Image (tube, rainbow, N blue to C red):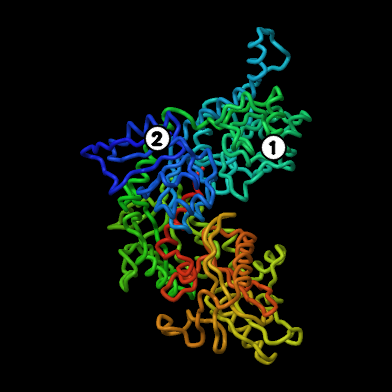
Amino acid sequence: MTYSEPARTAGRAVSLASSGITIYGCGQDEAVLFREMAPRFGVLPTITEEAVSEANTELAAGNRCISVGHKTRITDATLRALSQAGVRYISTRSIGYNHLSVTYAVSVGISVGNVVYSPDSVADYTLMLMLMAVRQAKSTIRRADVHDYRLHDVRGRELRDLTIGVVGTGRIGAAVMDRLRGFGCRIVAHDTRPSTSADYVPLDELLRQSDIVTLHTPLTADTHHLLNRRRIEQMKRGAFIVNTGRGSLLDTEALLAALESGRLGGAALDVLEGEEGIFYADRGNKAIESKALVRLQELPNVIISPHTAYYTDHALRDTVENSIINCLKFENGVSVTRVKIGIMFGGCSEEHPVSVKSAREVAKNLDVGKYEPYYIGITQDGAWKLCDGVDDQWQNGRPVVLSPDRSTRGLLVLDQGKYETIELDLVLPVLHGKLGEDGAIQGLLELSGIPYAGCDIQSSALCMDKSLAYLVARSAGIATPNFWTVAANENIDPERLTYPVFVKPARSGSSFGVSKVSRKEELPSAVETARQYDSKVLIEEAVAGSEVGCAILGNDLDLIAGEVDRIALSHGFFRIHQESTPETGSENSTPIVPADISAESRSLVQETAKTIYRALGCRGLARVDMFLKEDGQVVLNEVNTLPGMTSYSRYPRMMAAAGLSLADVLDRMVSLALMGKMR
């Protein structure tokens, strides 16, 4: 059933520029709200109960924006068809994005936005499930339904006597904890990025302590089957599991084994692995294909509900209204509230000048209609300055610091002896090298609780130390050069090496301190040169092959690979950031993008880059540099977690060749950082 509603424009509303919105997968309850709200915003909606698919993209004809539900998977082929139909924005009526590939949507020119609604709906439901589970509500209600009103020997428990473990403390997890405090129970929490006041413990410790474990963390490659057989076996005997997050956070077969053996006391599940095609449909007269679901429902201590925790009148109204507003924002090219971004640049490392140039390019390409930038320059002496931009006078800005106090979540600016507070939604570190790319600034940002773009502490530190990165890459089956490390005050026997070798600081970038050594007599001098930049020195055997690179953008399994480039060298090695006028070209190198290699080699380089990216735990973005040998083998060179963004840098060129401008890349970096904080 499809129908359109005429638009009536309210005087104070911002109207859609020239078209309407196609609303797919719209139930009757949502349709009532869309019909009510659309005239207020001056929107012409085309509403259909059908889920979006390749077969019905014509319903979006003439509309750049569509709204979709979360109940049906949106395939890449459908996204491609929508793009061909002229769709440029999808507002999904959900918090999560698990039903579509955001990365693929971006690659075909479609932006994706989610909606935010009050966490109270899911938090309330979670508490209800907890109480039903510990009071044996399922068996009590079933007996009452057949007029058996006897008290049986299975007694309930009181929350005040229990320890509750909350996994994931974002908006919903925090709301659950707020409610639990009123019951007087002990609460422990686990989150990889703690963001609220709680008694945080490692996950394994939480499982050992908790009488109830409730799941509120996003579903990613890292959290898939977060509670697997091993972790369930760590839980208290008789404990309960509550899941209102995502079904695949929980290994269903492992859960069944623990329930059927009597190890667990019960489970209350609003979400389930494989729920797609089962939930949201009347299956009363049809066989259930999911044997796991049938087994769970047969157990007297398991409560199943069909992914309905979010479903309240308040949340539904929020969802519909925010979906319309998202489309309005996109169509008008502005944000009602711009995202406040702190852009950090400069720094104390030898790569300070490169960082300043990168920040200038970011400033040129950042969409100020969407973002409100605050430029934070760090001098080479380590002084922090809040400046109006990245011009030649930025070092004269006002003194500023980033507050590590999470109640501030932003900047403290010194002005006439007093501190002014500026709250930030996000930080974009445009810092290269030591104290910017090695986990140091990431640690400060973790303390502050402010989302930030790029890799976290662990992956930043790991990638910065090339020797450690090689060890992890090798464990993932990736080829690396043969290498040796030389610690401070340690010497290495030149006779051990096969020449030529490259000597470099283990933890530096942009080729600072790197020497090519062709004879053993040159080794001591090269080691001393490297030690000017790092006490730990790396010596690598030279790899005979082409220098190639691949830009990666995304998180977990959802990655965009830019075009592969190849560095054509006339002599020496790639060191463009140390040249005097790199903007006009290099003295010894020419970047070729797309690389002049076979399609098979190109695909191998891209897939190897993704494997390396995941193995090293990278998030957000990175540039993976490799060697392509004549026999087709790909060998890791290094990974840059905050690659240069200058006018001559490789990363933006590779992404541009793949169809993503620097402005597009910045948009995606912001989305990835903000998505990482959602629950």
Q: Is residue 574 left or right of residue 420?
A: right
Q: Residues within 10 Å of mark 2 (few under 14, many from 20)?
A: some
Above or below — where is 375 with respect to 635? above
Image marks 2 and 1: residues in contact by CB distance under 8 Å: no
Taking the image as drawn, is residue 338 in sight?
yes
Q: How many marks?
A: 2
Picture quadrant where residue 190 is located: top right
The disc, 2 or 1, on the residue closer to the chain's N-terminal end is 1
Question: In terms of depth relative to the viewer, which is nearer, 207 or 576?
Answer: 576
Residue drawn where x is 50% and y is 61% of the image: 441
Going by the numbered disc 1, the residue's amino acid type is Thr
Marks 2 and 1 sit apart, C-alpha to C-alpha, by 32 Å
Q: Residue furthest right?
A: 261
Q: Residue furthest left?
A: 11
Above or below — where is 94 with respect to 260? below
Going by the numbered disc 2, the residue's amino acid type is Asp
Residue drawn where x is 53% and y is 34% of the image: 177
Residue drawn where x is 76% and y is 84% of the image: 496
Q: Quadrant of the N terminus?
A: top left
Above or below — where is 148 with respect to 256? above
Q: Callout 2: helix, strand or loop? A: helix
> Could you say where residue 586 lies in the image, as x and y percent from the top left?
47, 84
Q: Is residue 264 left or right of residue 648?
A: right
- Rendered image: mark on residue 318: 2
Question: In terms of depth relative to the viewer, which is nearer, 648 or 185?
Answer: 648
Q: Residues within 10 Å of mark 1 (few under 14, many from 20)?
A: many
> Could you say where residue 602 lies in the image, as x and y percent from the top left?
59, 71
Q: Callout 1: helix, strand or loop? A: helix
Q: Is residue 321 left or right of residue 147?
A: left
Q: Which residue is mark 1?
A: 252
